[in-house]
Amino acid sequence: MTDLSNEPDEEQVNYTMMDKKRKYALLIEAHSKDLYKYALWLCKDKHMAEDVMQEAFLRAWKSLDSLREAKAAKGWLFTIFRREHARQFERKQFQYKDVESMDTIEDSHHMGYDDRPEAFALRNALKRLPQDYREPLEMQVLGGFSCDEIANILDISSSAVMTRLFRARKKMRQILGHESAPQLGVVGE
Amino acid sequence: MNCLDFKRLALSDPNSREHSFVEHSGSCPDCLKYVGGVRQMDADLSNSVEVEMPSDLMARLQLNQELTEEAETLAMTVANPMKRYAMAASLALALFVAGFMASNQFGAANSIGEDYEALLSGVVEHMNEQPITPVWSAQKANSNANTLLASYDPDMKLKFLSNLQFSRVCPMGQYKGLHASLETADGQVTFAYIKGESVGELLDAGYEGYVSRVKPVRGGNLIIMSRTNKSLEEADSQLEKAMYWDI
């Protein structure tokens, strides 16, 4: 793989002039770790996360010419991933129905997650949020996206994103208030 | 901004750089503590799903792209000239057939074809470069092999092989492919799946001290390298039953 260790900050890279292969290598280097973390959380299964991620990167390669700005790369890639996830998850749902409901410490260990009780409580609290609230929170906290970027990806207004994030965190705190240990650093309502 | 507005924004965007938000947090210790708690929860949540990415995933993402690019290039070189130079192609084909028939007459068909040799030499080159093959648990080796094969072709599957010891995508001469090993009664047998154009037919050959088999399979070739005929047959028979396409 191309060594990109001395590359300039991705934000400063001019994608328009860049060779397609180099652009792709940069995309992998810069975003694959974040995307894998997000993928594993969404898929709840290592193999499926890898499958969906590989398929998403292949689709990204095929339409890479349409990506002009480095700063848009992450959002663009996550959008491709989410579409691919929706497509594959619909197809494979019957196989993963049971996986979706897995919540044990053993499962966490299998996934490679932190298996301390406080981490376990946080993940469960996130899972218990309604989909509309959970999705923007995952994007902001796990993906590092701004409210405007989330609005773009989800195709809703920024104010709707703000409202959903507000409700998501409020709900999380309610849930954790009952379930979590105090060392989580959560301030009460 | 009052404390209520601040807390509302803190729950929506705790890292907001909005001037009034930053200013209020500097002047109100309670609100600073509040937003600190929200940020801490975010950090804890993010850490709770922190995972190590599989070490070979980046290489697979790169490999998939290279294989796709190769396929695209091949499709383009095949498609365009055929339209423009159909006549010339027919002539070339006729010459090729004539040449092939002539070479058969003089016994040239007894040598190993270039395709076979490139596949065999690629696998042996890699085996020589990596004389030590790790021995994994069957669980890990099977799980890895299935994921790697699925990255080549989502329909391609491998039934559980209790004697599978290792599987990884490796460079093999001019190719990259799945390198795996099977334990047999006569010792370890190495096999490789290399995606690409399949060879015409199965070939058994002695190569660099190995008993080898190059076998066309869907979407590529299977190369089996063994020290004895018996273990070669045993491994091939196992793989024949284990590899399938879920279509």
Image: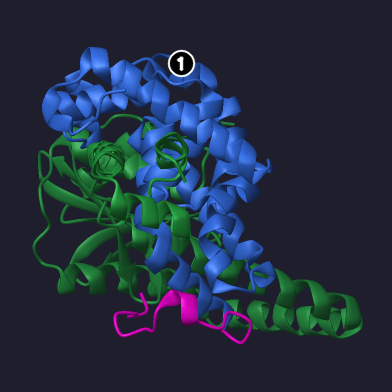
Chain colours: A blue, B green
Q: What is the crowding at mark 1: few (fewer than 14 residues within 10 Å), some, or many (at least 20)?
A: few
Please state which of residues B189 and A159 is positioned toward the viewer in this rendering: A159
Residue located at (23% from left, 49% from top): B52
Residue B28 in sight: yes
Q: Is residue B173 left or right of residue B102?
A: left
Tell whether position A24 is magenta. no
Q: Chain of mark 1?
A: A
Please state which of residues A154 and A185 is positioned toward the viewer in this rendering: A185
In this view, B160 is above or below A177? below
Secondary structure character of the magenta stretch overall? loop
Residue located at (50% from left, 20% from top): A130
Q: Position of residue B159 (x, y in %)?
A: 35, 30
What count of labels does the image hold? 1
Q: Is residue A6 left or right of residue A158?
A: left
Picture quadrant where residue A1 is located: bottom left
Q: Indicate the quadrant containing the C terminus of chain B: top left, top right, bottom left or bottom right.
A: top right
Q: Position of residue B17 (x, y in %)?
A: 44, 59
Residue B204 in sight: no
Tell whether position A9 is magenta. yes
In this view, B239 is above or below B98? above
Q: Position of residue A50 (x, y in %)?
A: 40, 44
Q: Is residue B240 left or right of residue B224?
A: right
Please state which of residues B10 and B138 is positioned toward the viewer in this rendering: B10
**Type of amino acid at the residue the image marks with label 1:** Lys
Q: Secondary structure at mark 1?
A: helix
Picture quadrant where residue A5 is located: bottom left
Q: Position of residue A131 (x, y in %)?
A: 52, 24
Q: Which residue is mark 1?
A: A97
Q: Is residue A107 left or right of residue B202?
A: left
Residue located at (25% from left, 47% from top): B232
Magenta highlight range: A1-18
